[in-house]
Image (cartoon, rainbow, N blue to C red):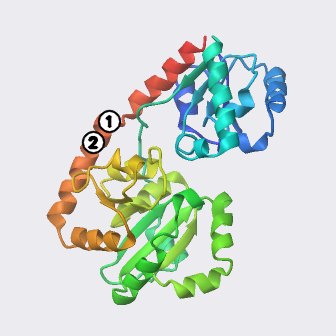
Amino acid sequence: IPQIFMHVLNPKHESEDHLEAVGHICSLKDAFGYENPSEIANLISAEKFEAALAIHLYKGGRLLQGSRIPFGIIFGGTDINEDVKHEEKHRVMGAVLEEARSSKTCCPFLPLNLGIMTTPSATFNWKRFLQNAGIPQDTENLRLFLLICGLRRVKDPLYLVDVFSEWHRREPHIHLVIIGPAVSWGFFFRNCPNYAHFTSRTPGVHLLQEIPQDDLHAAAKRCFAVVNSSISEGMSAAILEAMDLDVPVLARNIPGNAAIIQHKVTGLLFTDPQEFVQLSKSLMNDPTLEREIVTKAKVYVKKHHSWDCEREAYQNLVLRLQ
């Protein structure tokens, strides 16, 4: 299949690289740019696409209902964990799957393991990063925790803010940086409309808009730990990337996180903000535990989240659409 329409949630997705590596031509489109299946049908006809992939069963799959070309659905995390709780979304997703089951042209698919490949920038400017975050560069014994997430409710980015700020007041070298896509900042401003008031009320907590992925990987490597405070997760790429970068992970103890983190073996799982602080302190005071965790986490990622295995899975999916 030479011409493939990739229906995704952002303008770049690793599946494009996987498929172009074997000669397919891919055209990526943002799901938020289309409202109904007829718009997608017109696009398919105009561009003469021969197959399609949709990332997320609801956001992408709903727009491919009634499609006259073969299509596959790649499940995400939000659709499985959150969208199913919404009656209308649940109904739509069920209809998409029913269509997939009854038609030879449809191929629902769930990758078992997210493939990870990290690429830290060699030219990343750490001093500028600290400056943009508002962190004094002369901070002695700086301990920087990094929370990587889109600022939306399911990620619960403000979960640790109060306890972190209280900790920072006692130990000024402790900082938390929350970094996420600009398109999601509406969540933050709805919860904290006065940004200046927020930053003065919560010292030690800093907010940054998204940066290029290779810079983000380089920043993570310079941080003490990567944090995940989500209410719900499918398979967190940020967690797996931190593991690959030899950075300790502290994650909220939810099913999606517990599925990829073994507590005190490949990372640390906390159940509330107070336990987060307790576990962070224990990690800071035990270099042996830190080394053991990052070593075992790296082995886990290499074994279970191979980029090559994910590439093969995507390529096999397309072959099934022929």
Looking at numbered disc 1 in the image, what kind of residue is underneath it?
Answer: His
Which quarter of the rendering shows the N terminus? top right
Q: Residue at x 24, y 42 (%)?
A: 299
Q: Is residue 299 above or below residue 52?
A: below
Visible residue check, residue 245: yes
Visible residue check, residue 71: no
Label 2 belongs to which residue? Answer: 300
Where is residue 168 shown, x and y percent of the image? 39, 84
SS category of the residue bearing label 2: helix
Which image quarter: residue 24? top right
Of the pair 213 and 70, the residue shown nearer to us: 70
Q: Is residue 111 above or below residue 35?
A: above
Where is residue 290 shown, x and y percent of the image? 21, 61
Where is residue 22 shown, x and y percent of the image? 53, 20
Q: Residue at x 40, y 62 (%)?
A: 227
Q: Around disc 2, counting alpha carbons within 10 Å, would you say few (fewer than 14), some (14 to 19), or many (20 or more)?
A: some
Looking at numbered disc 2 in the image, what kind of residue is underneath it?
Answer: Tyr
Are dots 2 and 1 in contact, CB under 8 Å?
A: yes
Label 1 belongs to which residue? Answer: 304
Image label count:
2
Of the pair 266 and 29, the residue shown nearer to us: 266
SS category of the residue bearing label 1: helix
Give the CA distance from mark 2 to mark 1. 6 Å
Q: Residue at x 50, y 29 (%)?
A: 110
Whether residue 108 sits left or right of residue 306 in the image: it is right
